[in-house]
Amino acid sequence: MGNIKQITRAMEMVATTKLRRFQDSAVSSRPYAREIAQLLGRLGASMGDRLAERPVFRPGAGELTAVLVVGSDRGLCGAYNSQLFAKLERWLKEHQGEDVRLFVFGKRAYQYLTKRGLPVERYFADPPLEKVDYRLAKFTAKTLTDVFLSGQYREVAVLYSAFESMAKYVPTVVPFLPVQGASGSDANDVESDVILEPDVESLLVKLIPRYLETRMYNAMLEAITSEYASRRMAMKNATDAATDMQSLLKGVYNRKRQEGITKDLLDIVGGAEALRGK
């Protein structure tokens, strides 16, 4: 039991170290993601009806629905994966009758989906999510964009665990494509306050890929942060349980030892009394 406690304690410390690193990256990426989303919204609003002419702003021509599931490569992370899969099952039930194709990050998610017989269109195995950087997010965003523009898909969504605190990480499904919310801003915010060079359409062409890459990068960081937060909590609970079990076993051992000593003493005293009686 002592060895198990040492292992779980070591795993808790490793998870805590990695959690801090990923948490800092996830939190620092949020303001940039919000700003680029607001900028895209203002530029999109200034386009007016012309915005619908761009393919990424309207539903695709196909009938398929793509979902990127961001799970974990390893276990020992508490209810992280089970909560994610429960959210996926509820989402699939809501979209029953639709032709859903799954894109997957994480070995555990891939194993779960294949056992369920769900159609996995692509499994992103290398590099692992733990080595997430902007290049991986850029590659994933481009892959999903190409899928959306292929003419076979109507929409693309992302399922990941949103990190809210050390003890709270919520499985969330967010729409990825078509781009939404671009028409909710005031066009005057763009046209009256700043002079744009080049024109709005040219800026949108450059901004849309950056926006999608940033959203993907933020989702990946939130997912890996949630995973390590869950793993840290699971290993802490395991360490505490091992400590309690160790104390319980030590108490049982001491009682048994005391019973053995008492029995030996009684045998000695009984033998001495027998010799004295002779």
Image: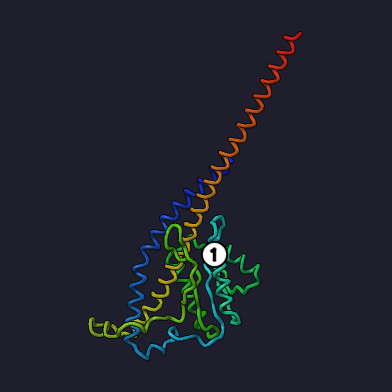
- 25 vs 235, left or right, is left
Say which residue appears at 41% left-offset and 89% top-offset.
52
Read off the residue under disc 1.
83
Of residues 136 and 165, the one drawn nearer to the viewer in this rendering: 165
Say which residue appears at 65% left-offset and 24% top-offset.
262
Say which residue appears at 52% left-offset and 79% top-offset.
147
| Quadrant in the rendering for residue 50 | bottom left
| Quadrant in the rendering for residue 21 | bottom left
The percent coordinates of residue 95 (x first, y second) are: 56, 79
| Quadrant in the rendering for residue 258 | top right
Q: Quadrant of the C terminus?
A: top right
The percent coordinates of residue 28 (x first, y second) are: 36, 63
Residue 100 to residue 2: above or below = below
Say which residue appears at 56% left-offset and 58% top-offset.
74
Describe the colour scheme in one phrase: rainbow
Q: Amino acid at mark 1?
A: Gln
Q: Secondary structure at mark 1?
A: helix
- 189 vs 40, left or right, is left
Q: In this view, which residue lies farthest toward the right?
A: 278
Of residues 133 and 248, the one drawn nearer to the viewer in this rendering: 248
